[in-house]
Image (cartoon, grey):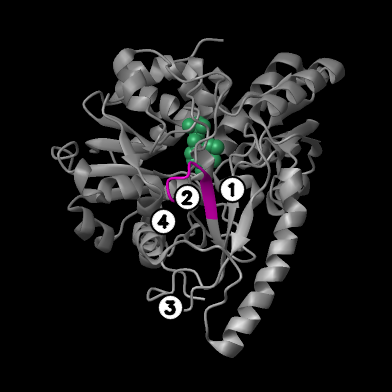
Amino acid sequence: MSFGPKEISLAYDRIRKFVHRTPVLQSACLDQLSGKQLFLKAENLQKTGSFKARGALNAILLLKEKYGEKTPGVITQSSGNHGQALAFAARTLNVPCTVVVPSNAPKCKRDAIAAYGAKLVECAPTMTARLETCEKLAADENLVVIDPHNDYEIMAGQGSVAMELLEQVPDLDAILVPVGGGGLVSGIATWVKHVKPECKVFCVEPQGKELERCLHAGERLWADPPKLLNTVADGIRVERVGDRCFQFVVANCEKTVLSVTNEEIIDAMKLTWSRTKQTIESTSATGIAAVLASRNKATLAQCHHIGVILCGGNVDLDCLPWLLMTCSWWGLGYDVVAAPIGLFDASMLNISESKGSPWWDSWWDGKSASGWLSVPFLISSTCQGAGELAPRCKDLHDRAEAVRRTARRTKAPSSRSPSPSGDDRRGRRRSMTTPYDA
Ligand SMILES: Cc1ncc(COP(=O)(O)O)c(C=O)c1O
């Protein structure tokens, strides 16, 4: 199959009776803060809680057109929105579906996929294991693999977001799109350049992805096998844009990429929740974060009417990102996760390719002026695997709860851990701008 505006238009005809035409929202507060008129395309209100339903439906509907009664089952690897979307689309269209999930996938996400009737198969929590398990099962059981992004049918389905948005708001100067593997942005940009070439499409990325370097080079400079980024925007954690998507991103998007930090994403997510009353997930907040960041002012100077894709709204309410921050461990070279007790999710660590033995500790800082972490714990990402972490998390949780109880009674610092020096603590707290009030 080829991919272009015609395929996007055909995809929309195919899927439109199964999806919502999501609303476009505005917020006077966000407009004032950004100095722009923002048009928020609320794909958080889409079926399954993200735009992913569009691509998944298109892929399966095309299979049904091709194979009719003999349509084979489908399979994918995903712990998130694509897994849910494919399971939903398969159930809607009466096709068997298997989803390969990493063993550390949060229970709420597994439950959501299973609730749509898909078969869940567990694998080791590495990108390589996910891809290999998927390929093997597909070969053994004659299933068709539906990639989360690097697939023309998926890209065409996602492009329908732009068809709707430009019908709803025809005079946009720019559209900001969060980019993971690139299915969403390649679909959107291909449609926008076809119907309104003067409208700019900007990729929004979590810091560290370095998409801009690749776009300037016209080459995918990322390492193989694909890495996962250390970001709270879990929908766009995959570092590498797929090869099929990349050519359309290079051809149709601005070369300047808007990068956002964890702090900016979290602040934007909180702001959007509180001002628009929309439950958006962290990835959805990246576009808002980008338009609010002062370093992007010059890039967006000529853009007054800006579309922002609120790509999803699937949030684990027990694990909100402002209750979890990542940081570097005092220059010792460890990646460390600090989180309030009970809110740690092992899948948030990129521990898959790492070596060494698990390391953790907890401490009580009764003098914390900001109340950032009352009893945090730290877990090094030098662990061998998530399996190892799960019992340790439980142990940590229990031990830290005991510390918390003691601390409440005594209101005094605990001496249970090798905590950093005062200076280091202050420096580190300053770098974590989001307070947690226990
Ligand atoms: C909510 C959300 N937004 C954006 C993306 C990025 O989409 P893509 O991988 O097509 O770039 C994803 C991917 O899973 C997602 O779940």
Q: Residue at x 86, y 20 (%)?
A: 141
**CA gap, disc 2 to disc 1?**
9 Å
Image spot of residue 408 (x, y percent)? 58, 85
Residue holding disc 3: 367
Is ligand 1 closer than 8 angstroms to the Cβ of mark 4? no
Q: Amino acid at mark 2?
A: Trp
Camera-nearest label, 4 or 1: 1
Disc 2, disc 1: CB below 8 Å?
yes
Cα distance in 3D space between marks 4 and 2: 21 Å
The numbered mark, 4 or 2, whose residue comes first in the sequence reads 4
Q: Which residues are magenta?
A: 330-337
**Count the marks: how many?**
4
| Residue drawn at (49%, 27%) of the image | 183
Name the residue carrying label 2: 329
**Which residue in the structure is indicated by mark 4?**
266
State yes or no: discs 4 and 1 in contact (Cβ < 8 Å): no
- Left/right placement of residue 21 relative to residue 382 reads left
* Inter-mark Cα distance, 3 to 2: 20 Å
Q: Residues within 10 Å of mark 3 (few under 14, many from 20)?
A: few
